[in-house]
Image (tube, rainbow, N blue to C red):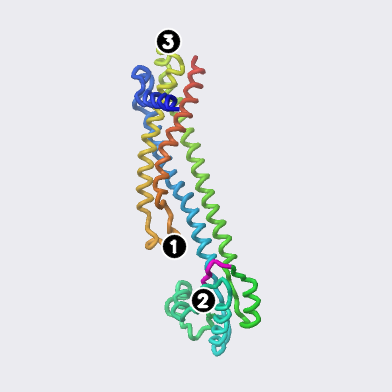
Amino acid sequence: MPARAAWHGRRALAFLAGDPQADRAVPPTGFTAWLTLLTAGAMAFLAVFALALALATDRLADRWGAELAQTATLRLSAPGEELAAQTAAALRVLEQTPGVAQARALTPEENQALLEPWLGPDLPLESLPVPQLVEITLDGGDFDAAGLRARLEAEVPGAVLDDHTRWRAPLIEAAGRLRGLGVLSLLLIAASTGAMITLAAQAALAANAQVIRVLRLVGARDIYIARAFVRRFTLRAAWGAGAGTLAGIVAVWLLPSADTAGGFLTGLGFQGAGWLAPLLIPVLVAVMAFAATRAAALRSLRAQS
């Protein structure tokens, strides 16, 4: 194993160092060079955002599911003189219910704050039949929503329990679809990058057909010539992807924080060790460029022979 690792290390160093004579067959500047650099950079920039979306939706689904799974809401509707009695009866039932950690009735000020975005700041709650809301916090134990509904129906007529099940499932499904879109975007970006690098390599091979013929006349084999193209285009793609990835990381870092952007953007981006994930993008682009250029070079050289 150590000998095999050393052999691979020597091959990697030789690949990076290159062969000056073979490198003459690959134009150092020009249309294909800029096309490779710009394509790799732009696609890497977009890949950072697609990766951020894919990672963020996992956290988003977990957060939405956890928050909604640990809470429930009880709505009480009754005439004003009966509402206080029903609220007290409901709180007694909830205190005796397994799985309920805490239950409290929202104050008129909290009701006002909940309704303000829809009905305005000057809403006269005292003159409207606004239901009393009870916020229920669950402790993660065995909470029997169906059993609690049956008891409330018997002891507190008109009470409506919402355990957020019908809200939680669509939100988690939406987060899953967003994650799927992020993964699909990464696949499309990878396919587009490979196609553009292949076209650039084929254009470079076609433009240097005369140089390639001269190299063949002096005994150069196709694999020797192809290696020069593969090395040059792989390094170009890696440099371009590195610059695009760095720009993408900076752009994600500059996204508005949750305090200024609202709850939906909470956690949109990378967190913790997730900031290291984009560093894989230049490596993957280089591997993809190596494979695409090698296949294109050997195919084009066979066609020119």
**Nearest-to-viewer mark from 2 and 3:** 2
Gap in Å between the C-alphas at discs 2 and 3? 86 Å
| Residue that numbered label 2 is attached to | 103
| Residue that numbered label 3 is attached to | 219
**Residue at 51% across / 74% down in the picture?**
102
| Residue that numbered label 1 is attached to | 263
Three-letter residue code for mark 3:
Gly
Three-letter residue code for mark 2:
Ala
Residue sitting at the far front: 2
| Crowding at mark 1 (Cα within 10 Å: few <14, some 14-19, many 20+) | few
Q: Is residue 87 magenta?
A: no
Q: Quadrant of the N terminus?
A: top left
Q: Position of residue 6 (x, y in %)?
A: 40, 26
Q: Is residue 139 magenta?
A: yes
Question: Is 29 on the left-hand or right-hand side of 213?
Answer: left
Q: Write the start and end of the magenta stretch as one range.
A: 136-141
Gap in Å between the C-alphas at discs 3 and 1? 66 Å
* Up/down of 44 relative to 262, above or below: above
Residue 262: name its quadrant: bottom left
